Image (cartoon, rainbow, N blue to C red):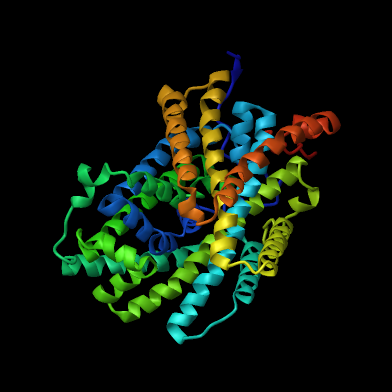
Amino acid sequence: MSATTSEPPKEKAPASASGLRTGSLGTADIAFFVVSAAAPLTVMAGVAPLAILLGGIGAPVGYLLAGLTLAVFAIGFTTMSRHVTSGGAFYAFITRGLGRPVGIGAALLALIGYNGMEIGVYGLLASASRDTLHALFGADVPWLPVSLAGLLLIGYGGFRSIDFGAKLLGVLLVAETGILVLLAGGVLLKGGAHGLSLSSFAPAHVLVPGTAAVLAFAFAAFTGFESTVIYRREARDPGRTVPRATYLAVGFLGLFYAFVVWIAVQAFGDDQVVAAAGKDPAGLFFTAITRYVGGWAADLMHVFIVTSVIASLLAFHNAINRYALALAEEGVLPRRLGRTHPRHRSPYVAGLAQTVLGAVVVLAFRAAHADPYQQLLLWVNTPGMIGLMLLQLLAAIAVPCYFRRVRHTEGTLRTVVAPVLATVLLATAIVLVVGHIDLFTGASRAVNTLLVLAAPAVFLLGLPLAWWLRRRRPEVYASFAAEPAEPAEPSPQPA
């Protein structure tokens, strides 16, 4: 074991090394970014009915188990965040624990993961907007203009300051969770279809074959929660804010998802909900809120699904920009991407590049006459989802490896037990997702194989890139994922 000492660094962001607006975000602000990326309303209305159809009335427990797994992961994850303060977040953690070649592969994996999770959702934005306009006004609109308008809107949101984004996401998140709370209130006040029941939590309804599929959906519903550490340099008192925001996001999502799925079960009854989900999965939540609250609430839900998608896009866009900024500062990406706006202090060049990339992908799918939901969303999102889950797994493995090599005062539970347990649980989650990949994509076996292999292939490309950097750009390789330098003390001025 090395005698290197690792003390948590002083909680003071570098003065203006990155140009980001330091001290802007509190715990709630960061939690808004993370929860908005998960898009709770979209996940519930769009995916939860399939979880009920496959897993039966025990589906709510799947979301609790996924949340518990990620809470275990967060123990080691947040502990390491006190020691590794680089702007590279995930790839910095992995570099410190598993070495630079693996860290560089993880950096590429982060780029494809977050880009995949955002760009694919422009297809969902088009599909959801089209459905909403048709439901409310009977209008049929082409999907491409909606996606391109979304690209411009999200690009502008990323261009503005981070506190502007936090305020906007706060409003949108309150709207989308509020409509689900309204549904819950209606169901609870009327006692559900046949009286309220806790049968969903009985072992007989949880320990069924379909629970594996529910778990796959549930883990996917938390995608992006780990991005709390990306905002470290913009957080107030990051040593406290980042862990609190992480636990707040995981706890809220796990409990809220389970509660809302249970409410859906109560709305139709234990003996009727599976049939209702099978008959009209896309309309399950709209039928429920119409029955228990009113048609006007269903109209609001249509609108808030669109705003939920917009919030998710903006949250992922901001996360991607900060990863690109960190990699540009490292010298792995072009330095130009590391520029920040002089007034808004946003990584606007990285944001512009990401918007252009998104436009290229969207236009390519349109040129191929692809469906915005079945192809653009599912085929681009799936590699992104797998990529982010692989990043979580690598980060869990990196935690005990890092703390084994350095002196520290952290307890064994945080540095060994929780990360090892999280590694086993996350590996199981990845196996479940890959084993049920056809449920996510609806594609052929050949397409699914390509989608599953895309993220590991990108990671493996990082290994020869690391070798090339080590030989041709040794200064970049040597400083990769290094801790930011402490600001220099001002020189004393003569009297």
- Asked whether the viewer can see residue 481, the reply is no
| Horizontal arrangement in the rendering, residue 314 relative to residue 273 (left or right) | right
Above or below: residue 153 compared with residue 9: below
| Horizontal arrangement in the rendering, residue 330 relative to residue 372 (left or right) | right
Above or below: residue 343 compared with residue 22: below
| Horizontal arrangement in the rendering, residue 265 relative to residue 82 (left or right) | left
> Horizontal and vertical percent for residue 378?
54, 58
Above or below: residue 89 compared with residue 322: above
> Horizontal and vertical percent for residue 104?
69, 36
> Horizontal and vertical percent for residue 418?
42, 29
Count of residue discs = 0
- Asked whether the viewer can see residue 253, the reply is yes
Q: Residue at x 78, y 40 (%)?
A: 493
Q: Residue at x 42, y 29 (%)?
A: 421
- In the picture as drawn, the residue positioned furthest to the right comes out as 472
Image quadrant assignment for residue 402: top right
> Horizontal and vertical percent for residue 484?
68, 37
Quadrant location of the N terminus in the rendered image: top right
Image quadrant assignment for residue 454: top right
* Front-lying residue, 231 or 387: 387
